[in-house]
């Protein structure tokens, strides 16, 4: 069963996985009933989370069986609830690139958000477009989310500058990517094109680069100011271990002057 789960996770296209997940969430929480781990998004507890990731970057006990949050989603939620005005501002105009399913319904229902989703293919997207050339006028959004997208695109600097262009002055966003914390510089090689080699070098079959510790500098080169949120300084170890946060993950908050 585990082998089948891992195979489907790594081979089925994302739009199909999103549709299948609605069926999966009905019975999975019953199988994983318990109180060893907590999901702050769905506010449910389980004996453990599901495993997730490619053969190269597979991780155990990370995927919530109810709302399908991963470490990065739970971390983002905690930041939005405790460190931002996302839930309390009178009105925010939001663009969510490649919208995560675990956030989609809740954000859509928030009365204080003018919430728009965008993606090339996702069935959750209101607007479909290529991130290299966003068909939206300048200075439109107060908040932009773009998580685990930039490692897939051909020209990440161009995409970052496009996101900067459509953000309002004074706006902010969260742009997460996979980062190899052992690398000082981002690793990219255009000659690596096969899914097998991309997984080996970039951690996933459809990634075209593996970011290093220079990621904040890349965001700054696109015009953003960057603030780094380190949850280790903000909560007891017991709590973030129950949330199953990744020990190396930091949250990159971008801002536009």
Image (cartoon, rainbow, N blue to C red):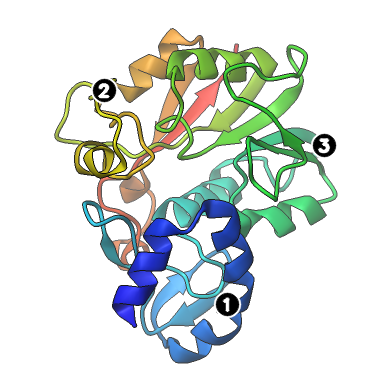
**Distance (Cα) linking label 1 and label 3:** 32 Å
The answer to which of 255 and 109 lies nearer the viewer is 109
User: Which of 159 and 253 lies nearest the eye of the viewer?
Assistant: 159
Residue picked out by circle 3: 91
The quarter of the picture where residue 140 lies is: top right
Residue for badge 2 = 188
Report the quarter where the C terminus lies. top right
Q: Is residue 59 visible?
A: yes
Q: Where residue 246 sits in the image (x, y, percent)? A: 30, 54
Query: Circle 2: is it few (<14), some (14-19), or many (20+) Cα within 10 Å?
Result: some
- Left or right: 95 as drawn, with respect to 29: right
Residue to which mark 1 is pinned: 25
Q: Decide: marks 2, 3 in contact (CB < 8 A)? A: no
Q: Quadrant of residue 105?
A: bottom right
- Element class at badge 1: helix
Q: Nearer the viewer, mark 1 or mark 3?
A: 1
The residue lying furthest to the left in this view is 182
Q: Are marks 1 and 2 in contact (CB under 8 Å)?
A: no
Please indicate whether residue 214 sits to the left or right of residue 174 in the image.
Answer: left
Single out the mark in the foreground, 1 or 2: 2
């Amino acid at each position: 069963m585990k082998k089948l789960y891992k195979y489907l996770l790594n081979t089925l296209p994302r739009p199909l996985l999103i549709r299948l997940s609605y069926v999966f969430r009905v019975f999975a929480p019953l199988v994983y009933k318990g109180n060893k781990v907590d999901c702050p998004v769905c506010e449910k507890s389980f004996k453990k989370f599901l495993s997730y990731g490619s053969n190269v970057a597979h991780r155990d006990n990370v995927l919530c069986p109810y709302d399908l949050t991963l470490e990065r989603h739970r971390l983002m939620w905690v930041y939005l609830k405790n460190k931002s005005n996302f839930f309390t501002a009178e009105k925010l105009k939001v663009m969510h690139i490649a919208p995560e399913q675990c956030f989609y319904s809740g954000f859509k229902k928030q009365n204080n958000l003018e919430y728009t989703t965008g993606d090339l293919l996702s069935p959750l997207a209101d607007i479909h477009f290529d991130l290299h050339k966003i068909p939206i006028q300048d200075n439109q959004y107060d908040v932009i989310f773009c998580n685990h997208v930039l490692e897939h695109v051909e020209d990440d600097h161009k995409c970052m500058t496009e996101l900067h262009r459509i953000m309002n002055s004074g706006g902010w966003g969260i742009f997460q990517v996979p980062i190899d914390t052992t690398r000082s510089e981002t690793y990219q090689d255009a000659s690596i094109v096969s899914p097998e080699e991309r997984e080996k070098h970039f951690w996933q079959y459809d990634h075209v680069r593996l970011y290093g510790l220079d990621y904040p500098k890349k965001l700054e080169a696109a015009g953003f100011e960057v603030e780094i949120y380190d949850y280790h300084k903000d909560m007891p170890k017991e709590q973030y271990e129950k949330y199953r946060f990744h020990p190396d993950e930091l949250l990159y908050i971008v801002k536009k002057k």
